[in-house]
Image (cartoon, rainbow, N blue to C red):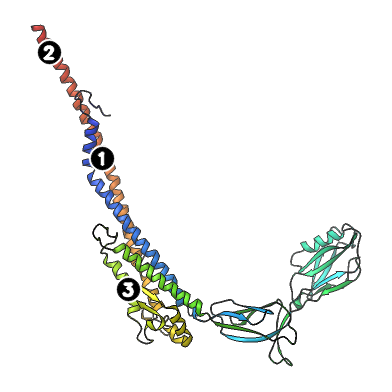
Amino acid sequence: MGSVDGLISGMSTSSVISGLMQVEAAPQTALKAKVATQQKVVTAYQGINTKMKALLTASKALVDPTAWKGGVATSSSDAATATTTSSGAQSGALSFRVNKLAAAHAVVFNSTVAATTDTIMSGSSFQIDVNGTPKTVNVTDTSLKGVVDAINKTSDLGVKATAFQVSPGQYTMQLTSTTTGSASTFDFTSGGNPFTLGAEQIVSTGADAELLVGDPATPLKVTSSTNTFKDLMNGLTVTATKVQQPTDPPVTVTVARDNEGIATKVQAMIDAANQALSEISSQTKNKSGSVPGGPLAGNSIMSQVASNVLNTVSGGTASNGSYKDVGIELTRDGQLTFDKAKFIAALDADPEKTQALFIDTAQTDVTLKTGLADKLSGVADTATQTNTGTLSRLITSGNDAITDLNHRVDDWDVRLQARQATLQKQFGAMETALGKLKNQGSWLSGQLASLG
């Protein structure tokens, strides 16, 4: 039944019902407030979880022993370039001369036709012997253009064709291997040259690239079918770019420890730890005067997570010295500092000892490892593991609580709708009753007036 504002009583029954419903809805309003508070708590946990996952990623980048090996390659000459293909590249130096560059096999024909549509062969196929393997090319159009198309469309042939104009109205063809190296050579099989384009002339012979190492009189020869020599040293790729003259100095390629790169990874780990600590501090701060506290104010579990991060540094390592020796210290306000120059100096002076401060390769039990990266990785992993991590469980528990509260809010919707309907019915009945009373009063007044 709808509202009947002021029909008989003159009162705003809808306003009265609205006021009563606000009182009735107080428990639901309280539940909604709890939902909002719980959502802030879950969001806070999620923010800390994100920062701790970033710390896990950054620390794992240093837990990998290959991150501490050689990684920067340099070349002394523009005759060759050098790059490392993995973080585990072998440190060291190698000298050599670039004696040959890799070449693709190519031939051209010394006669021409007047147009690319002119016929240059008879029959419907021919064979090309590619590095000792005969391969058949089927031809349906025996013109110069048709033969070029047939060669280029033959899969796995290893040879491509090009028709080109020698002079106005004079066309011929070049065949070129699709790869370089001595294995790229090709020739026609026993059937011979099938084309009416004259004799074939070698443009270039397929050849391997060649480096000479050692005594110039009796050098060791290092060959590659391309100009790229992969794993010339472990993790090192060298690319030859030009042939050297006998009087040119040899190329010296050096692979050195990537101290800058390692320092950058350490800085990233320290930054990630500080960001996680700052996030925990922000979310757990207590109210101060008019400044509100964080959603997790006074949360002892999160305070313990922060302590676990800080203790990885304050605890040090009994066997390898202090983290201060490699530029890492704690500040009074609960942050970590990193002195990059001090770290690089320590790494230069004693690479093994410096590495041991971050990763404990001797210990197989993860929980007993003493390296800083090991410990930070363990703290972050314990906090963020899916389903079992401290933060993961708190987030799941918080979301479950929100779901339960929302169900209770929904239940109140049903109860309040029923209550509102009851109030509307009651007030409607009241107006109806008042209407009857008014009618009776009017009748009585009329009767009394007739008696007078």
Looking at the image, tell me whether mark 3 or mark 2 is earlier in sequence order: 3
Q: Residues within 10 Å of mark 2 (few under 14, many from 20)?
A: few
Q: Position of residue 86 (x, y in %)?
A: 56, 77
Q: Quadrant of the C terminus?
A: top left
Of 357 and 367, the residue lying toward us: 357
The residue under label 2 is 445
Q: Position of residue 239 (x, y in %)?
A: 67, 77
- Mark 2 and mark 1 lie on one chain; the one further toward the N terminus is 1
Cα separation, mark 2 vs mark 1, equals: 43 Å
- Please identify, in this view, whether the residue under mark 1 or under mark 3 is nearer the observer: 3
Q: Quadrant of residue 143?
A: bottom right
In this rendering, is residue 118 above or below 431? below
Name which quarter of the figure residue 131 lies in: bottom right
307 vs 149: above or below = below
Name the residue nearer the viewer: 163 or 100: 100
Q: Nearer the viewer, residue 172 or 120?
A: 172
Label 2 secondary element: helix
Q: Residue drawn at (77%, 63%), measured in percent from left and top?
A: 154
Left or right for 165, reference 405: right
Q: Earlier in the sequence, mark 1 or mark 3?
A: 3
Question: In the displayed structure, would residue 300 be above or below residue 322?
Answer: above
Q: Is residue 372 left or right of residue 434?
A: right
Mark 3 Cα-neighbour bin, 10 Å: few <14, some 14–19, many ≥20: some
Q: Secondary structure at mark 1?
A: helix
Contact? badges 1 and 3 (CB < 8 Å) = no
Disc number for residue 308? 3
Spatial CA span between label 3 and label 2: 89 Å
| Dot 2 amino acid type | Ser
Q: Residue at x 28, y 67 (%)?
A: 301
Type of the residue with mark 3: Asn
Q: Position of residue 291 (x, y in %)?
A: 27, 58
